[in-house]
Image (cartoon, rainbow, N blue to C red):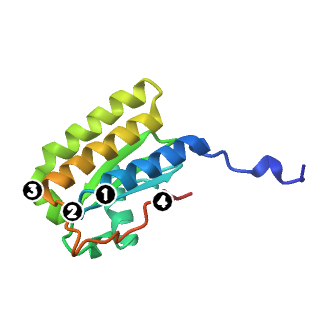
Amino acid sequence: MGIFSFFKKKAFFSEQDQARIVTAISSAEKSTSGEIRLFVESKNPYMNPLERAAEIFFQLKMERTEDRNGVLLYIAMKDRELALFGDEGIHKKVGTQYWENAVQKMISQFSNQEIASGIEQCILQVGQTLQDTFPYNSLTDKNELSDDIVFGK
């Protein structure tokens, strides 16, 4: 055991939960041209969670998808904040109420301490919506963004 082991950051998810979430992202994207990413950080640096999600969305260059159909799920664990941010292509098709309803469903899962399950279900729900609005085309579609979870500070 090293002297710095006290400073090791606690993981947000178990390895199994992390694998489930990444699998959900991959599965959700198989039948759509849309892209889903999850960004998790400890604390939100003093802004509205939706504004933070938008900031991260553009930092990750998610607006560069061909159909503008990327979706970012943002979570600040210690602050207990989350937001869904959809690019203009998907947002025009589903509207603000869709995102608010999806967030509320996730919050109900979180309140039962089912964080990974809530994230997984939200990803699958968003994936189904993306499939309905941006179906997969085997001739033109490709995975434009990584399916891995992005961890902030």
The relative height of residue 141 versus residue 13 in the rendered view (above or below) is: below
The label number, if any, that marks residue 136 in the structure image: 2
SS type, badge 2 = loop
* Crowd class of label 2 (few under 14; some 14 to 19; many from 20; radius 10 Å): some
Q: Residue at x 23, y 69 (%)?
A: 138
The residue singled out by tag 4 in the image is 148
- Viewer-nearest of labels 4 and 2? 2
For image coordinates 31% across by 57% down, the residue present is 29
> What secondary structure is found at the residue carrying circle 3?
helix
| Residue at mark 4 to residue at mark 1: CA–CA distance | 15 Å
* Circle 4 SS class: loop
State which tag comes first along the sequence, 4 or 3: 3
One can see residue 50 in this view: no
Q: Which residue is mark 1?
A: 30
Which label number is shown at residue 93? 3
Q: Earlier in the sequence, mark 1 or mark 3?
A: 1
